Amino acid sequence: MDEIMQKAHELGELLAASAELTQYQEQEIAFHTNAEAQKAYAEYEEKSAALAEEMRNASMTPEALDGFRSRMNAIMAELTKNEAAKTYLEAKSAFNQMIMQVNEIIGYHIRGEESGGCGGNCSGCSGCH
């Protein structure tokens, strides 16, 4: 068990020193100190919360779900017009993707097979980002 904990610490140190984390942290600071980005994010939160409430109160037909997805994509597109918000979300996504890949590799070695989780290719996915 000591060897496992040592390797876990080594992995943690590598992740902490990664370019992905550095970029994410830098962009997070830039995002949180940018008044326009904060305003855009507040508007995004407000619109997405209203849309989520509307979804809870609607009957979910495939057409309605497609409409909600389309509207959510439009809300996100509006947010990402702000460059600070866009680069922050991209950096956050890149770091999260790396963490998911690390978890997938660990899981593969535990289970001996891939879990079928997100592999980063969203061509057949409705999206999670």
Image (spheres, helix red, strand yellow):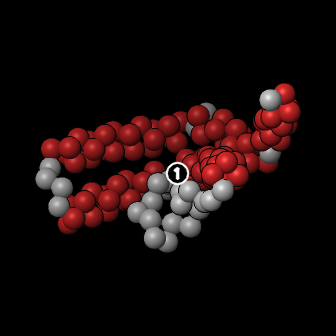
Query: In the rendered view, does 41 fall on the left or right side of 23?
Result: left
Give the number of marks: 1
Up-down relation of residue 75 to residue 15 (above or below): below
> Camera-side residue: 123 or 42?
123
**Residue placed most toward the observer, 87 or 8:** 8
Q: Is residue 95 visible?
A: no
- Bin the neighbour count of mark 1 within 10 Å (Cα to Cα): few under 14, some 14-19, many 20 and up: some
Residue 127 lies in quadrant: bottom left
Disc 1: which residue: 82
- Residue 31 location (% of width, % of height): 60, 40
Q: Residue furthest top?
A: 2
State the quadrant of the N terminus: top right
Q: Is residue 90 visible?
A: yes
Please give left or right for residue 68 compared with residue 83 in the image: left
Residue type beneath disc 1:
Asn
Residue 39, quarter of picture: top left
Q: Residue at x 83, y 37 (%)?
A: 7
Percent position of residue 27, x then y: 67, 43
Residue 63 percent coordinates (x, y): 20, 66
Residue at image point 32% right, 59% down:
69
Residue 78: horizontal and vertical position, in percent?
42, 55
Residue at the far bottom: name it. 123
Q: Is residue 66 left or right of residue 118?
A: left
Secondary structure state at the residue bearing disc 1: loop
Residue drawn where x is 66% and y is 35% of the image = 29
**For this rendering, which residue is in front, 98 or 2?**
2
- The residue under the point 74% across, 48% down is 20
